């Protein structure tokens, strides 16, 4: 069976953690909508991310070098490299079946721009309802 190819408007971005143990590819637009979440962990880590469905994301190497942190509802899976500690991507609570990718962890050359949007993660339930209770938060 032939592998399904992403839509032509998507670009292949490659990235990874600081030490290079974890590498991934993601198919996303060349200009992405980046979410700046105000929840406790995102503020402390200064996380900013864009969202893609799992079908547009693939770990190229280092899955065995990832460790996971969860808290509160344990729905978000905050994975990070157990060698260098960098979180290049994670599985967010607001987008089951997708990944939140850190644009600053992409290799240079494919990302042409980003727009920043704030998500009121401190008031997660109300903010999510404001978006219509939709998981459609992609770029």
Image (cartoon, grey):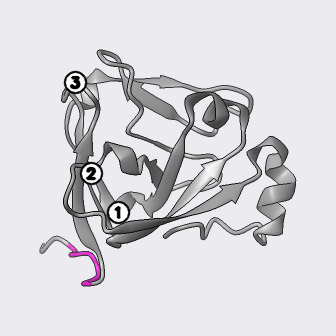
In terms of depth relative to the viewer, which is nearer, 30 or 25? Answer: 30
Q: Which residue is mark 2?
A: 58
Task: Report, in whole angstroms, how far the alpha carbon at label 2 lies from the one at label 3.
Answer: 18 Å
Q: Is residue 131 above or below residue 14?
A: below
The quarter of the picture where residue 7 lies is bottom left
Question: Residue placed farthest to the bottom in the image?
Answer: 8
The x, y position of residue 39, in whole percent, is 72, 39
Confirm or deny contact between disc 1 and disc 2 (CB under 8 A): no
Task: Report, in whole angstroms, how far the alpha carbon at label 3 lies from the one at label 1.
Answer: 26 Å
Label 1 secondary element: helix
Dominant secondary structure, magenta: loop
Q: Residues within 10 Å of mark 3 (few under 14, many from 20)?
A: few
Q: Which residue is mark 1?
A: 55
The answer to whether 72 appears left or right of 91 in the picture is right
The answer to whether 4 appears left or right of 44 in the picture is left
Look at 37% across and 46% down and name the residue there.
104
Look at 83% across and 64% down and name the residue there.
129
Q: Earlier in the sequence, mark 2 or mark 3?
A: 3
The magenta span reads 4-8
Quadrant including the N terminus: bottom left
Q: Which residue is mark 3?
A: 19
Q: Residues within 10 Å of mark 2 (few under 14, many from 20)?
A: some
């Amino acid at each position: 069976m032939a592998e399904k190819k992403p839509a032509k408007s998507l670009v292949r971005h490659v990235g990874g953690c600081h030490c290079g143990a974890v590498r991934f590819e993601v198919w996303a637009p060349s200009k992405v909508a980046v979410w700046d979440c105000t929840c406790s962990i995102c503020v402390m880590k200064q996380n900013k991310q864009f969202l893609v469905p799992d079908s547009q994301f693939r770990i190229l190497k280092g899955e065995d070098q990832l460790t996971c942190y969860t808290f509160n509802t344990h729905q978000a899976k905050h994975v990070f490299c157990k060698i260098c500690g960098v979180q290049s991507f994670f599985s967010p609570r607001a987008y089951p079946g997708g990944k939140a990718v850190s644009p600053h962890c992409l290799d240079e050359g494919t990302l042409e721009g980003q727009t920043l949007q704030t998500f009121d993660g401190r008031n997660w339930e109300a903010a999510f309802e404001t978006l219509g209770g939709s998981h459609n938060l992609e770029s």
